[in-house]
Amino acid sequence: MYRSLLRRAFIISSSARMMSTAPEANNLWALDKPSSLKRVSSSPVSNYRLVNFSNRGLKRDCSTATPSGEAEGESVNQGVIQNCLLLKGIPWETTVDKVTAFFGDLSSNIVEDGIHLLYDKFGQSTGQCIVHMTDAASVQNAVGMLNRHYLGNRYVDLIPCSNYYAKYQVARMKRDNIKSTESIDDKKLNRLTPLTIIKAGGLPFSANVTDLVNFFVEFNVPASNINIVYDGTNRSVGIAFVGFQSRSDAVDAVKKLDREYIGRRYVDLHL
């Protein structure tokens, strides 16, 4: 019996010693409220597992950290080289010459054929323009000197953009414009080829051939020389091509009738 008592005392003392020397990481007691204790248990994690978790998180972060708009190709700042400007808010009747004049002395820093007015698929101005400068410093100078200055009766926002973005916008505009002209009757267009053609834009969607005959009445334009452009659903896109017997008549018509009204809308005429 004496031996069994000694064995029991040894077991109790050993248990007490193990509890007193247990690592704090395995048994933590945190004070949650003044009146209560909250036990927080933790398990040791090997360095290998920590590295694994870190690498997995890093890969996940890298895979999702893509530039905004990259999938659509429309991010203004996408690309490293930013030698271009996006002009927003320009008047719809703006021409390349007017944009050049807007830049003044800075126009010498615009590359040749570097001004691109943007149109939608119906041939209407979007009020935006891409300008390709010679270098990034010229872009910053233009922003500093001309941002929110007036072009005509509207102020213009100058936004630096990447060459990639500029090329994307110009290419998309050309693609859309090609699609919009596919609805023109080829036979009628062929008949107009020997004539001098002007483009009439900004027409009321309800305008018909008779309205245009009356609009050009003093130039004796026959109905057969007028082609209104329609989209795939047979709706007018507000554009027509008008054929004149001579170039002088076409020039006189543009000079006299450009920005005159049909209904409540003025008409833009371009040779």
Image (cartoon, rainbow, N blue to C red):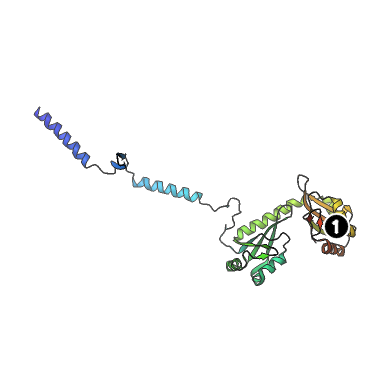
Q: Position of residue 100 (x, y in %)?
A: 69, 68
**Tag 1, which secondary structure?**
strand
Residue drawn at 85 percent across, 64 percent down = 252
In the displayed orientation, state which residue is furthest to the bottom. Answer: 105
Asked whether the viewer can see residue 183, the reply is no
Residue drawn at 65 percent across, 56 percent down = 169
Horizontal relation, residue 48 to residue 233: left or right: left
Horizontal relation, residue 80 to residue 95: left or right: left
Amino acid residing under circle 1? Gly
Horizontal relation, residue 38 to residue 192: left or right: left
In the displayed orientation, state which residue is furthest to the top. Answer: 1
| Vertical side of 235 occupied by 217: above or below | below
In the displayed orientation, state which residue is furthest to the left. Answer: 2
Q: Which residue is mark 1?
A: 243
Q: Position of residue 126 (x, y in %)?
A: 69, 56
Quarter holding residue 150: bottom right
Q: Nearer the viewer, residue 186 or 225?
A: 225
Q: Residues within 10 Å of mark 1 (few under 14, many from 20)?
A: many
| Vertical side of 187 occupied by 2: above or below | above
Q: Position of residue 230 (x, y in %)?
A: 78, 49
Q: How many marks?
A: 1
Position of the C terminus by quadrant: bottom right
Horizontal relation, residue 39 to residue 110: left or right: left
Q: Position of residue 92 (x, y in %)?
A: 72, 59
Position of the N terminus by quadrant: top left
Asked whether the viewer can see residue 171, the reply is yes
